[in-house]
Image (cartoon, rainbow, N blue to C red):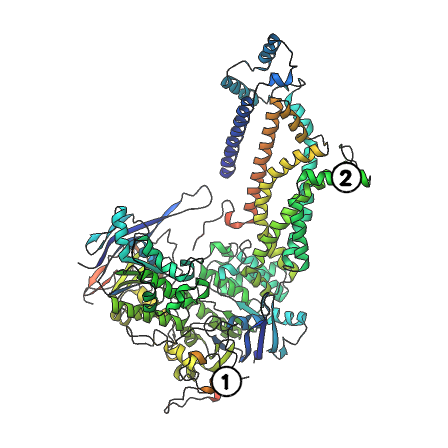
Amino acid sequence: MFWFLTKSLRAVITLLLVVTFVFFVLRLSGDPTYMLLPDDIDEATRTFYRQLWGLDKPIFVQYLNYLGALLQGDFGISFRNNQDAFQLVWDRVPKTALLTGTSLVISLVIGIPLGIVAALYRDSWIDRAVMAASVFGFSMPNFFLGILLILIFSLNLRVLPSSGSGTWRHLIMPASTLGISFAAQFARYTRSSMIDVLNKSYMRTAQSKGAGTARRVNLHALPNAAIPVITILGLKVGELLGGAVITETVFAWPGLGRLLTSAVASRDLAVVQCIMILLAITMVVANMLTDLTYGWLDPRVRVGAKAGSR
Amino acid sequence: MVLRITSLEVTIDRKKGSPVLPVRGVSFAVEAGQTLALVGESGCGKSMTCLAIAGLLPRRGCVSAGRVVLDGADLAALPTAEAAKLRRRHVASVFQDATGGLNPVRSIGWQVAEAVRLRQGATRAEAGREAVRLLGRVGLPNPELRAKEFPHQFSGGMNQRAMIALAVAGNPRLLVADEATTALDVTVQAQIIDLIADLRDSLGMAVLFVTHDLGLVAQSADHVAVMYAGRVVETAKVSDLFAAPRHPYANGLLKALPHLAPAGGRMATIEGTVPAIDALPPAGCAFAARCNRASEACRTSDPELRGNVACHNPVPLPVNQTVNRYENEKIMA
Amino acid sequence: MSYLEATDLVRSYEQSSRGLFRKPHKFRALDGVSLKLEKGTTLGIVGESGCGKSTLARVLLGLLDADGGCVTLNGQPTLNLPDTQWRALRRSMQLVYQDAGGALDPRLRVRDQIEEPLHIHNLPLDAVERILVSVGLFSALADRYPHELSGGQLQRVVIARALVLDPELLVLDEPVSALDVSIQAQIVNLLMDLQRDRGLTYLFVSHDLGVVRQISTRVAVMYLGRIVEEAPRAALFANPLHPYTRILIDAVPKPDPSLRRTTRIEIGAPPNPADPPSGCSFHPRCPLATARCTVEPPALRDFGDRRVACHLIKETV
């Protein structure tokens, strides 16, 4: 419990830092009224909007007002279409969650078994093939792979839609684009972690007990090999969300990523801030989940485990 | 004889260069209730011999010649699956680094119980109870509680006890202990040695005890096989070897022991170093370059193990020594 | 005045603990260690893992700071010196430790490894071949890399590197433990020859009583951060006074089948150094412990030319 409290406290501090950073960086980057209002507007109107959006006050007052509103769950109003920023963002969450979730599943389902197989058949043609494919997979930029897929499956073969999000067929290409590069990375991490574990002397002990290959891999090697992979998985959530921004743009997928790019371009401060906070919360939660899984997998860091007594 | 290996040869393929033979024709035998010590310095092939017996050779290694006969069945000639079944049932191994030899994410009890289930086919609950009994048998205090703990919570000595419990699950016929006490403190080492002897006597196991420490050989073994550069150069009853070593290498090793030298005086040495397995002399005895008894014959022909020593010019027996060499015939293959 | 004197050395480690309810606890790796070492002699330090022997070696060399106590070399205090004086002093004391392979930089030739300390101290570089020969290596090895040498040769190179600054004191921490029996003997002989020829003083730390018996003039036995017995070599091995020393010597496997140990080594599990027992820290494992041993820690008392920390030893010994 104590562990959970300190973790939560740290998470709150992290979020506060993110909020502060995003707030000031966005204010420093210029006056939104020039972006959102027509160029030929008169100064009086401009001032009116500044007052309306609270941009006329000193920046620290703006910051405190913003924090105060946040605490009441008020993320502000989108400058661009006068909607509640949070509602605007929240409407997009399911789409992005669907995309990143599917990508993550694809990457794990493809990457981890491939990594295991490559490790088990180390130095064989299987291993070399998996590793070559993996280099190809993660060295290809998302936007390039996305466009390549559109060229092949939408323009040439005409089997999949190139943009939009209506049906499951819309999901295939963006999720694959995002998933493949992560699958490639997970294959690598799993392989090296697995090779490391397979060379450990407790694997020889398992063999000398007469444990068969399946038992040795599933019950002895995997729980150990999973530990570093889980750590990396936690860190990759951030990258996955970053990748989603690009992928959503390529496939015109109406998720958070596309909202973010357009909000940044038009300096729609409330929306950008809201998205950033949401992303930060996701990262923090992902990290806490990683820590929990880690403790569950590894008795050496298990919370409340007895200290090494002799 | 529980185990009799004859002219065992192990070949290791290398990624680069020609294959090497860390074990080049090794023969010895171990009886039930007896301990055979396999001694030699690093790189002499004693660990590879053990791994070949236990079926744990590295991926690139294989038994390329010879026989490994366990209770009458030649493991090297049987189909792999059948040999594996026999080994699972009758051969157990304990290695040097017990803490590394135990899975860090599984409880001690789980790991011992797994061995029980694999060897005896017990149910989960039976195996758990048997694991606790075994942990108590190897002298672990509070076995019910300690069974729930993990290797990082144990000292090295306790982990080695747990490894031994795991090894003797299902009463194996042969226990291979490869440098099983090397990393331990002397007091703990003495206790583990006693434990192995105790289990050997009560379970009637044959023990193959691999070590570089001649002190341990003298303390715990019945017979001894001295290895050098992948070969057995001398076999003997322990008392005979220490009374009158015949091979110049065995003789040199005994003389180099600090306990036998007058304290404070110079220690006897064997000049030079053990040759690497890929840098053996093309012909002749591998020890010839370091041997003070080497003759021309030693540089041209590699001596076979004849009687109980593989040497063209063995150290002569002391005249007043009446060593009963008859006993040796039993452990000779 | 002895060449090297240490008085009441104390050094604690903080043991970090996982979990947030437990405070990190301190344990004393050195708990009031005093010793004297005469010039040209060897003091062997023996004890089981975790007894503090390696910590002692490092504190004496100033590689680890002591929390308390003092060390003098030729009557000069050596702890907490300003850097310049410390560097000058450092030349006269060198450390050789177990892992010879790890102590050498794999990318440097033997020559460069040995010259390095000379560069650091701005000394002429002519000594390399001479020093290699003096540790029993061919001078041609100077142009080899560490991976081209055997374990015994590597340990000789490490010794050569320690000797190149012409030190007076060598602190040897398990210098032969990783070597094969036949090579061990070669290195022990080399160390004894070097001591005779150069008048070196050795502090020889090892868990191997056989090697310690071979090379030492006096031997100190450590247990949980304290010296429990210190005596001339012959007296210690012939007539160990402290029960722990006796058990330690009994437990060493004698390479003589006719001296097979018939009794069990009656000694419990080693205690947790972070939570040392009350009184004499050895009492839970001691077959002779009395009620007094459980409450009162025994002082290290003089008995002729030896020192023992045990309540059971009477003044008449």
Mark drawn on residue A151: 2
Q: Give the residue type at disc 1.
A: Thr
**Is residue B245 visible to the viewer in this orientation of the structure?**
yes
Q: Between residues A83 and B171, which one lies in front from this camera angle?
A: A83
Residue drawn at (66%, 30%) of the image: A256
SS at circle 2: helix
Q: Pointer 1: residues within 10 angstroms few (<14), some, or many (20+)?
A: some
- Extreme bottom residue here? B319
For residue B39, above or below residue A35: below
Q: Which residue is mark 1?
A: B300
Image marks 2 and 1: residues in contact by CB distance under 8 Å: no
Farthest residue in the top direction?
A: A44
x and y percent of residue C272 in the render?
A: 39, 54
Neighbours of disc 2 within 10 Å: few (<14), some (14-19), many (20+): some
Marks 2/1: CA–CA distance: 74 Å
**In this rendering, does residue C173 appear at all?**
no
Give x and y (percent) for residue A151. Answer: 77, 39
Q: Label 2 is found on which chain of the structure? A: A
In the picture as drawn, the residue positioned furthest to the left comes out as: C1
**Residue B119, percent across and down?**
61, 66
Is A119 on the left or on the right of B242, as rendered?
A: right
What type is the residue that disc 2 sits on? Leu
